Amino acid sequence: MPDPGPSPVQSSLPAAAAAFGTYGHGRGVEAVGCIRPEQLAVPAPADPPAPAGAPHPALERLLRGPSGLGTAGLHLARYEGPPLAAPEPAGAAEPAAGRPIPGLYHHPVPEPDPVRVAEISRRIKEWADEVDLYPPEWEDQFDGFCVGRYMVACHPDAPDIDHLMLATRLMVAENVVDDCYCEDHGGSPVGLGGRLLLAHTALDPLHTTTEYQPAWTESLRSDAPRRAYRSAMEHLLQGASPSQADRFRHDMARLHLGYLAEAAWAETDYVPQVWEYLAMRQFNNFRPCPTITDTVGGYELPADLHAQPAMQRVIALAGNATTIVNDLYSYTKELASPGRHLNLPVVIAEREGVSVKEAYLKAVEVHNDLMHAFEAAAAELAVSCPAPNVARFLRGVAAWVDGNHYWHMTNTYRYSLPDFW
Ligand SMILES: CC(C)=CCC/C(C)=C(\C)COP(=O)(O)OP(=O)(O)O
Ligand SMILES: [Mg+2]
């Protein structure tokens, strides 16, 4: 079931943005005490099982948002201000190319608004200059990353460019840390723990004595990853509540833990078992991106709802599906990189003794299973907890999943498919 049509989320993002969101910084969202663990265990009442590959009917119905008389205005906000006459930097708004991986379960998304894409692309270059992010010779790669298209596709309910920029700076900063500390722009597994910990203090500040505080403050200016983290976090704090910021820090600590496991295995030349690889990839994962969907949307999913095990499962499954999408689209790029780069097809081939093609096709199935599990878990939660901010958050996560697939598929500068079909 490669393309079952528009996602219940994307087709009907009708959602309740205007009615349910606050478009401030999320204050004013009433706590909804609707989730108790025993309630979450209750399955959706009387929904027949979805046909294989189709979204769960409850997901379709509940994520569709309000319908009927008087609900026409309750649709996700799109940019409605004056046209933004931004010049288009290279790579900002080229027509989308690329084809989906055959057999990959995914939902197409509408073409991201080119006006928003162009403005984000312009502003992110300004920010990159401001924090002295990369040397001039890396500019083509920066443009080829097309972060504007990425973030606009993933956050269709962002009320404005400023909110989108919160996600965009973080996306760039996260990739700079990965490239410069872990991967092919000077990265290495050797000494990674120390570098990551010090960079993490740009997100989660050091509180120490007056003697030592200045050296730490100075350290945050000492390399591009730290300058990027510090500035992107400073901006996030202007748009996030304290609990949203702390949710993000927790996700980033998870990410850094995942980097460390990957590095440790690289240092000892260990190829993990498939389940071990999937555990590492649950941490070395896109999770910090979809979990800020409410901050970027201008509302807040309260901490007690975010922390519920059922919500945590939905988020983990969504993060895992999005990250295996990366493994599949980046497979040929990683094969061409020096040394052995672990990704799901490589680990399956090695550990299960199958051909690279069989391993790749099995990895597609693993991805599809994760996607179906994500959609089923989201549907069940939407039934168990019919709170507007829960529904909107679930839609936001699903929109991120779909936008992430779109970006990988269309980023032909960065990724190309293997010749397996
Ligand atoms: C944006 C973010 C939180 C990134 C975290 C880690 C990361 C870069 C990925 C999950 C993408 O995987 P990978 O490192 O394999 O990226 P490329 O294949 O090089 O695009
Ligand atoms: Mg990859």
Image (cartoon, rainbow, N blue to C red):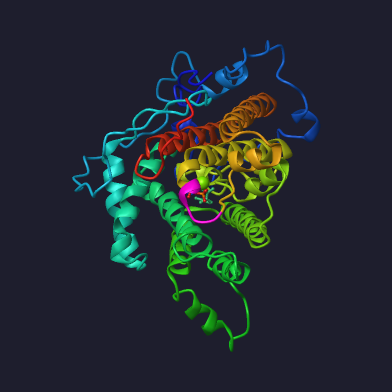
Identify which residue is drawn at 64% across, 60% down.
260
Q: Which residues are magenta?
A: 334-339
* Vertical comparison of 45 with 332: above or below: above
Identify the residue at horizontal 56%, vertical 56% (top origin).
Answer: 245
**Could you say where residue 381 lies in the image, as x and y percent from the top left?**
67, 29
| Magenta stretch holds residue 338 | yes
Say which of 237 and 139 sits in front.
139
Residue 145 percent across, percent down from the top left:
37, 48
Q: Is residue 263 left or right of residue 218?
A: right
Which residue sits at x=37%, y=28%? 110
Q: Is residue 340 left or right of residue 330?
A: right
State yes or no: residue 219 in magenta: no
State the image coordinates of residue 88 (x, y, percent, origin top left).
22, 46
Please tell me whether residue 390 is drawn above or below residue 264 in the rendered image. Answer: above
Q: Quadrant of the N terminus?
A: top right
The extreme right residue here reads: 38
Residue 252 visible, this angle: yes
